Image: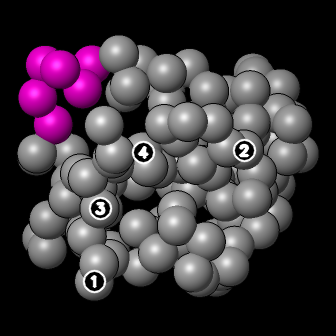
Amino acid sequence: MPLRSDPNCIFCKIVEGTIPSRKVYEDDEILAFHDIAPWAPVHFLVIPKEHIPSLAHVTPEHAPLLGRIMTLAPRLAAENGAEPYPEGGFRVVVNTGEHGGQEVHHLHLHVIGGPRPWKKG
């Protein structure tokens, strides 16, 4: 069964390959790629390939996928230059809805790390 996609979603277009990205990781369900306007030395996004508009739209059926995304984030952070906990570390941010600062309405995690101060966030 093909994954749900939104033809107007920039992240769905990145998943499809019609918009290029600097990939960090990819499998059948998940894509991670560098942010085009990074806030910090380490800043990439982790998204489900399926179009899920926001965290407010997840259901219990999404739990295995979300669990994989959350357990993947620390590994990818380390592989991309975030120093280990506790001296180093990283931040995971999920913006949800307009008031939550969500700009692209496709569920995504920002993984941000590296020496502070950062530009934003």
Q: How much space separates mark 3 and mark 2, taking CA atoms? A: 19 Å
Task: Say what secondary structure mark 2 lies in.
Answer: strand
In the rendered structure, the answer to whether residue 64 lies left or right of residue 88 reads left
Residue type indicated by callout 4:
Pro
Task: Say what secondary structure mark 3 lies in.
Answer: loop
Q: In this figure, which residue is indicated by the disc labeled 4?
A: 48
Residue occupying the point 75% across, 59% down:
23
Residue occupying the point 41% across, 19% down:
67
Give neighbour class at mark 3: few <14, some 14-19, many 20+ (Cα, 10 Å). some
Point out the tag, 3 or 2, that comes first from the N-terminus. Answer: 3
Q: In this figure, which residue is indicated by the disc labeled 1?
A: 8
Q: How much space separates mark 2 and mark 1, taking CA atoms? A: 23 Å
Q: In this figure, which residue is indicated by the disc labeled 2?
A: 25
As drawn, the label of residue 5 is 3
Main SS class of the magenta portion in the image: helix
Residue type indicated by callout 2:
Tyr
In the rendered structure, the answer to whether residue 47 lies left or right of residue 50 reads right
Point out the tag, 4 or 3, that comes first from the N-terminus. Answer: 3
- Give the residue at the far front of this rendering: 1
Point out the tag, 4 or 1, that comes first from the N-terminus. Answer: 1
Task: Indicate the position of residue 28 as horizontal and vertical percent values.
Answer: 55, 36
Q: How much space separates mark 4 and mark 2, taking CA atoms? A: 12 Å
Mark 2 near mark 1, Cβ–Cβ under 8 Å? Answer: no
Residue occupying the point 89% across, 45% down:
81
Mark 1 near mark 3, Cβ–Cβ under 8 Å? Answer: no
Q: Is residue 94 magenta?
A: no
